[in-house]
Amino acid sequence: MQNDLRGNLAAVNERIERAARKVGRNANEIKLVAVSKTHPAEVLQSAIDAGASVFGENKVQEADGKVNVLGREKIEWHLIGHLQSNKARQAAQIFDVIHTLDSIKLAERLERICLEENRASLSVLVQVDLASEATKNGIKEADLPKMIEFLDTCQHLKFDGLMIIPPYFDDVELVRPYFKRLREIRDALLPNGALSMGMSHDFETAIEEGATIVRVGTAIFGAREKIAAN
């Protein structure tokens, strides 16, 4: 398993390097989040041994179990799945970055929890909905200015960028306009902000369009493992 993960990580990093070079970017500007949802802690440990240090989880409860086993000292934990308000406190306790902030109400809750938990700073990205897909979350582009205005008042939430989960297309060129538009929005509203966009099948296109964070699971870990619901 570890040898497979080492080879897969090397291959993904080479693809990142190649995509960055194609558009004159430095691959060191791009953070690789290994999407570890549904994979058990022992698989993550093998990934750590193979060189991974940043993991993306979809579910707070599942991530909590892995954090308890693997710790936080040398690992970054990113929440990349939808955050329900009743899980906000637990999320604020265990994650280093939350990619999926999608409402002022949730931002208010996280800010209050950080104060109550004596957490000085919590990095958040705002998930933007550009495709209006019923199955996906995110804030509408038109509502972004109000969200940013609120985040500018926060003492604990650190607004670090934008995130998108675009529609899935076999032809990755059909995804490119969503990545391009998110970059344009970022450039207008938060010029130095992060852009979390791109997954296993389209992260090279995302990098060409300016991604600074890519979320890659299948290309590293292979097909997802099913685990019991918590």
Image (spheres, rainbow, N blue to C red):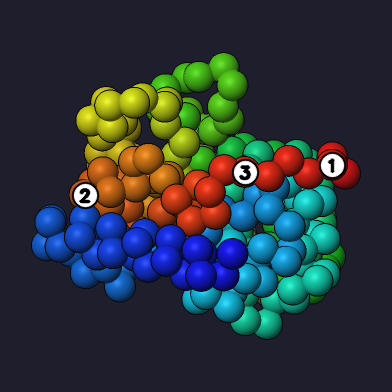
Residue labelled with disc 3: 224
Residue 180, numbered label: none
In this rendering, position of residue 154 left or right of residue 34: right
Q: Quadrant of the N terminus?
A: bottom right
Q: Secondary structure at mark 3?
A: loop
Query: Is residue 90 positioned above or below 198 on the image?
Result: below
- Image quarter of residue 173: top left
Residue at x-position 62% and y-position 71%:
46
Residue labelled with disc 1: 228
Q: Specify few, some or many for label 3: CA neighbours under 10 Å numbering under 14, 14-19, or 20 or more.
A: few
Q: Specify few, some or many for label 1: CA neighbours under 10 Å numbering under 14, 14-19, or 20 or more.
A: few
Amino acid at the residue labelled 2: Glu
Q: Are marks 2 and 1 in contact (CB under 8 Å)?
A: no
Instruction: Examine the rendering and report whether any part of residue 174 can be seen.
Output: yes
Residue at x-position 50% and y-position 19%:
133
Of badges 2 and 1, nearer the viewer stands: 1
Residue labelled with disc 2: 208
Query: Is residue 28 positioned above or below 11 on the image?
Result: below
Front residue of 136/40: it is 40
C-alpha gap between disc 3 and disc 1: 13 Å
- Image quarter of residue 201: top left
- Which of the two labelled residues, at mark 2 and mark 1, occupies the earlier sequence position? 2
C-alpha gap between disc 2 and disc 1: 37 Å
Front residue of 193/145: it is 193
Amino acid at the residue labelled 3: Arg
Query: Is residue 124 positioned above or below 31 on the image?
Result: above
Residue 93, horizontal then vertical, whole percent: 78, 65
Residue 19, horizontal then vertical, whole percent: 21, 55
Q: Are marks 3 and 2 in contact (CB under 8 Å)?
A: no
- Which of the two labelled residues, at mark 3 and mark 2, occupies the earlier sequence position? 2
Residue 37, horizontal then vertical, whole percent: 65, 49
